[in-house]
Image (cartoon, grey):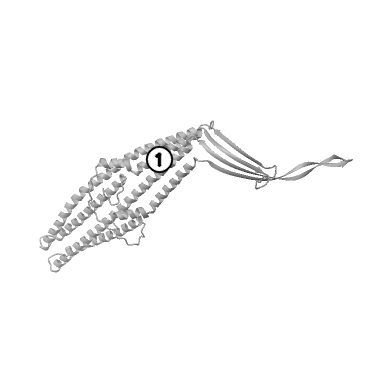
Amino acid sequence: MDLEKSVSRAVQANPQMQSAKQQIYGAIEGVRAATAAFAPTGTVNYVSTASSSRTPVTVTQNVNGQNTAIGTTARWGDKYMATLDLNINQPLFTGFRLLSSYQRAKLSKDQADALYQRTELLLTRSVQTAFLNLLKARSDVKSNQDSVARLQSQLKVTRAFYDVGLRPRLDVLQAEADLASAEQALLAAQNSVEIQLAQLNSLLNIPLDQPVDYLGELSQIPFNYTLQQALDEAYKQRPDISIALKSVEIAGKDATITLSGALPQLSASYDYIKQGDSWDLRDRNVSFTDSHQFQINFTWKAWDFGNTIFSYRQATDNVKKLQADLAKLRLDVGADVKTQYLNIQDAAKRINVAKVGLNAANEGYRMAVARYQAQVGTNTDVLDAQSRVSRAEFQLTQALTDYQIAIANLNYSIGRKSPGLTM
């Protein structure tokens, strides 16, 4: 996979993207819930009551054809009553609470979209940085391999001269010591390649032991942006600014919701009530009743000892705090964009200087080897020239890596999606 395919794979497979996507789905459900709050609500209430009571009863006796009371006694009696209440309630005015809650839910959805974009940009930058560091590690391996090959060749020549008595033993020892150091640097560079492969596989959600052929090369890609273009684009589409702006608007809606408790509340309700002395409420006898009720409910909290107004002031202070955070974020974004822009310019200059230095180092090494073989130069001259070649190669590799990483960082800073690092 090349760089662009690696980024596409990460965006599709990395769990971070799934997490951000689920946040959007949750925000969509929040909008639906806030919309449903405008509709009437229905409540069904069924109460079944069974009671037993003890009541006094007069005891009579028939004397000469007449019932005469002779005393009282108490008797137990059972009573059953069932009530069904179907209520429909429609809010008419809630102090702008429902409207503000709906607007807040929509802002939360917009904020979730911006969070998804930021997650995608962060992941893209992480993949690009890991990919470029892998290419750098491979270039370091190649440079170290070339260094080892040069030192091995020099060691053979030095040993040949020593065997015939043209060079002292010290030259051989110096060549062996430098070769050992170069071999250690080669091992470290090879280990770095394996580490970068593991990090890249992890970002792409690929098993760490699965071999993947990542294809690419370090190069100086064209860059024609001006600083002002980069700043304008960043202020317009940077997700962090959008997230902060939505946070300010959400805090404003929270303040309105808090204040709604101090405003009048108006609602309409309808009740259908059915009662009877049987559990199924069938019309069997005179104990059955059926009624309809319509109500307009108006409430207004007279006072709460300042609880609502203090909470509202707290919410408005939070709005002002978020506004200040937004202003600071704009400053930070501008500084970040300029920093990455200057890093690109600096890396481009270092690339040009490193290329000149590498050409000079290669020529110097060639001349040092020729002088040594002609017996007019020293082994130290050759080893120093070889070291300068390796250092020049590393400097060029580092400059190319810094250049492309700075472009990746600038793309993130301005909120621009560029999987292949094109500008």
Residue for point 36% across, 39% down: 326
Residue for point 21% across, 62% down: 148
In the rendering, at what x and y percent does residue 29 appear?
A: 45, 46
In the rendering, at what x and y percent does residue 262 appear?
A: 50, 33
- Inspect the image, locate mark 1, and give the three-letter code of the amino acid beneath it: Ser
Instruction: Please state which of residues 72 and 404 is positioned toward the viewer in this rendering.
Output: 72
In the rendering, at what x and y percent does residue 230 appear?
A: 27, 42
In the rendering, at what x and y percent does residue 30 appear?
A: 45, 44
Residue for point 20% across, 50% down: 351
Residue 352 falls left or right of residue 55 = left
The picture quadrant where one finds residue 208 is: bottom left
From the image, which quarter does the N terminus lie in? bottom left
Crowding near the residue tagged with mark 1, few <14, some 14–19, many ≥20 C-alpha atoms within 10 Å:
many
Residue for point 47% across, 44% down: 33
Residue position for label 1: 247
- In the image as oriented, which residue stretches furthest toward the right? 64
